[in-house]
Amino acid sequence: MTAPTPLPPEAEASAAFAANMAEAAQLMQAIWAKMAEAQGDGTQEADPLNTMPLMAEITQALWRDPARLAEATVNYWQGQQAIWQAAMAKFMGGAPGPVPRLPDGGKRFAHKDWQENALFESIKNSYLLMSSFVQSQVTDANLPARDQRKAAFLTRNAVEAMNPANFFALNPEVLETTYSEHGANLVRGLKMLLEDVTRGKGKLLIRQTDMDAFEVGRNMAVTPGKVIWENNIAQLIQYAPATEKVTAKPFLFVPPWINKYYVADLNPKKSLMKWLVEQGHSVFVISWVNPDAAQAGETWDSYLRTVMEIIDVVRAECGQEQVNLGSYCIGGTLAGTLLAYMGKTGDKRVASATFFTAQLDFEDAGELQVFVDDKTLSMVDEQMDAGYLPADVMASAFNALRANDLVWNYVVNNYMLGKDPFPFDLLYWNSDSTAMPAKVHHFYLEQFYIRNAFARGDLRVLDTPVALGDINLPVYHVATREDHIAPANSVYLGAQMMTGAKVKFVLAGSGHIAGVINPPAAGKYQHWTAPNLKAETVEAWREKAKEVAGSWWPDWDKWLKKHGGGQVDARKPGAVAGVIEDAPGRYVKLRFDQR
């Protein structure tokens, strides 16, 4: 039998490309079918962020100074002309002329062709000029602060979506990879896209890390302990001691329920919980359930009652009258209202409070505020008709705050280049999203983000009016300088309003996560301390504060031990309440995309 004549290299490459494109077409059909299944009746809100009134306001503001707008427009088109002329000169082999001063394009334009190839360089420069022009017009509109923030967010997301690096035909790295791999990268990418749409039940859940590299209880959330109590919305974990002696007064951590508690127990090197145990503290942590329709009836008050019940469980387990309470993010908002209620009613079961990046004054509440007004709240209520806000909705909101890094970067890397994302524990945690009980979430958005009722002294919890000034115990309050979820100045102003408390305020370097989860052994960042809160802003406070290299954890440990009530023999988890199961427990392992 005669062997087949081998194809020339060019024909073999063409055949491989054709085969890959055929497979890519089949994958696209499967993806569209999955997405079509999730469309329901096809009715969607045309303006989910209520942007139209704001766009009209921006237009009116810009036309109040038509001469300035005209000048800016002329300068813009002159800049585009200069970019085109420079590209033509470079293409013809001449020396390119000057181009307008442009912002840094960042790592999205790292490929050499964005700098060396005349066509791609001109595309990049044209985009950067357009991006700068659009965003500067919004800045120059001089809107009220809240509207200005929303407008800046919307325009930033719009121009980030238009980045030429996001498009197959305009991205030189994608084109180069597709040519060299004969389209195999697109097949791999579309397979990942199909998997991510399937995981999201028809909605795209962009993978930001290797989802198979981590598992809660295997290599995340592994600090030894026991679940010693549970109800419909929470489990209580007591960690095993690592020292013979421990602080008499136990430490109870109230994490956010917008994300899972194990951000504080990512792995042994980064774990705040493990570090606390090793410093000789008796540590307990609440693990909130990932809710569904079973939690539809839960309210802000029922979450407060659960924390108070847990406080009593911890007190009984340790034989102590008081606990030291810690909290993070929205867990700190809940804890703040609880401590105000306890202060108002004379309840002394908490000896001290620690807040990590916890907002209590929401007057200037950061970029999440752009998602909340009366109209968007009504639309959120419609999304929660099953009694809870689906986890993917909140995940999408957080990703939109940093779309270049958390959305478009992965669209290109995963689906166009066909590369697996890098294994990163923090991004696995970030993807492990949680749902929200409808009544709890509505209360949070309405009473804090819209009404700012707590800071204004107009909040009622447990049938009692409360204000920040009702908190009357020692407080350790941590903000992070680069926080876009709970801006440092907002946290600082909330701390100032605790007029009945003795507050130690600390400003940490970095952001909402890295500034808090910063183990001393890493030797990263810095923090600032000062004896009072008399400055008007956090930056004015920082200018007079003492800067200390490294983590703030050791400083907090000293403060916490001052309120620890001395030392006692270490306690075995569940000695009084009994043991339900090993830590980290069932609740934290329940993923929304595996239901």
Image (cartoon, helix red, strand yellow):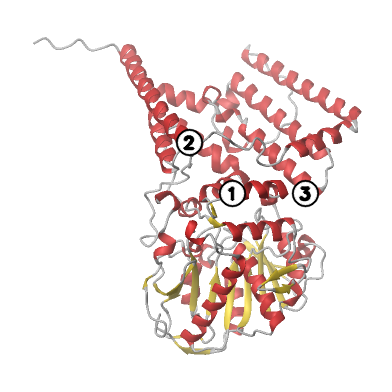
Residue under the point 73% across and 66% down:
454
Q: Amino acid at mark 3?
A: Arg
Front of the two marks 3 and 2: 3
Nearer the N terminus, badge 1 or badge 2?
1
* CA neighbours of label 3 inside 10 A, class few (<14), some (14 to 19), many (20+): some
Residue under the point 53% across and 38% down:
409
The x, y position of residue 389, in whole percent, is: 55, 52
Q: Which residue is mark 3?
A: 146
Q: CA distance from mark 1 to mark 2?
A: 20 Å
Q: Nearer the viewer, residue 549 or 135?
A: 135
The x, y position of residue 268, in whole percent, is: 43, 65
Q: Which residue is mark 2?
A: 413
Front of the two marks 1 and 2: 1
Nearer the N terminus, badge 1 or badge 3?
3
- Location of the N terminus by quadrant is top left
Q: Nearer the viewer, residue 280 or 495?
A: 495
Q: CA distance from mark 3 to mark 2?
A: 34 Å
Q: Is residue 213 left or right of residue 506?
A: left
